[in-house]
Amino acid sequence: MRSRNRRLLCLLGITALLVPGAMSGTASAAASNQTCNGTFTGTAATLTVPNKGTCTLNGSATVQSVVVGQGANFTCSGQTISGGIQANGAAWVEITNCQIGGTVQLQALTGPNDSYICQSTVTGDLQVQQDAAAESLVIDSLTGDCQYSFPENSFGHDVQIQNNAGPVDFSYNNVAHDLQIQGNRVGVTVDYDNV
């Protein structure tokens, strides 16, 4: 009986060596939440840009979702974000040639720079609401900040452009579901969209 117990303990010891964390009950760590104020090159479950911060995603970054703080700015160029982007009260957001797996929410942007989405694919919804900035919000492929930047943007679900104070250019885009435009003060330019 004693030799059988000894054999069992030896087997358990080998299992613990082969499987890290098997005896301690800990699994290998998943991506953790991170903060970005500068250039981000790491891995994050949720990447937060602090209030009045600045964040640029580097080509080596792996990010699931992004939250942009008040007065902050965020740049995504040539990146894949598996989840969504939420910017509420941010200064500006620049998205070029990015693959976004969730919804993009741009709410109550303040400026002073233009915000834009060019050459990008958003699998979920796009919500542009209550933009307070006098600067333009360009969601386009041929004008302004997005000039001559094919391919066109593609949105996999609904697009809502509502109650914005500044001008919005929504042109040369593909929208899989509904396009809702209402309550905008200056007006919205809509040209050559496929809805």
Image: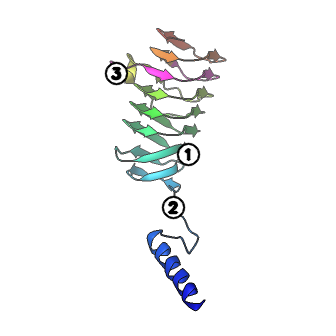
Depth check, front residue: 102 or 161: 102
Q: Image height check: is 106 above or below 12?
A: above
* Disc 2 versus disc 3: nearer the observer: 2
Type of the residue with mark 1: Gly
Figure disc tally: 3
Magenta segment, which residues?
Answer: 148-168
Type of the residue with mark 2: Ala
Query: Contact (CB < 8 A) between labels 2 and 3?
Result: no
Is residue 195 left or right of 98 when viewed as pictured?
A: right
Residue 153 in the magenta stretch? The answer is yes
Q: How is the image coloured?
A: rainbow
**Alpha carbon distance from label 1 to label 2:** 26 Å
The residue depicted at 39 percent of the width and 17 percent of the height is 143
| Residue 33 placement (x, y as % from top left) | 53, 55
The residue depicted at 59 percent of the width and 70 percent of the height is 25
Depth check, front residue: 122 or 74: 122
Mark 1 Cα shell of 10 Å, populated few (<14), some (14-19), many (≥20): many
| Residue 20 placement (x, y as % from top left) | 48, 69
Q: Which residue is mark 1?
A: 69
Mark 3 Cα shell of 10 Å, populated few (<14), some (14-19), many (≥20): some
Which of the 4 image quarters holds residue 108? Answer: top right
The residue depicted at 58 percent of the width and 85 percent of the height is 5
**Alpha carbon distance from label 3 to label 1:** 28 Å
- The dot on residue 29 is 2
**Alpha carbon distance from label 2 to label 3:** 39 Å
**SS at circle 1:** loop
Q: Which residue is mark 3?
A: 149
| Residue 34 placement (x, y as % from top left) | 50, 55
Q: Image height check: is 106 above or below 22?
A: above
Which of the 4 image quarters holds residue 26? Answer: bottom right
* Disc 3 versus disc 1: nearer the observer: 3
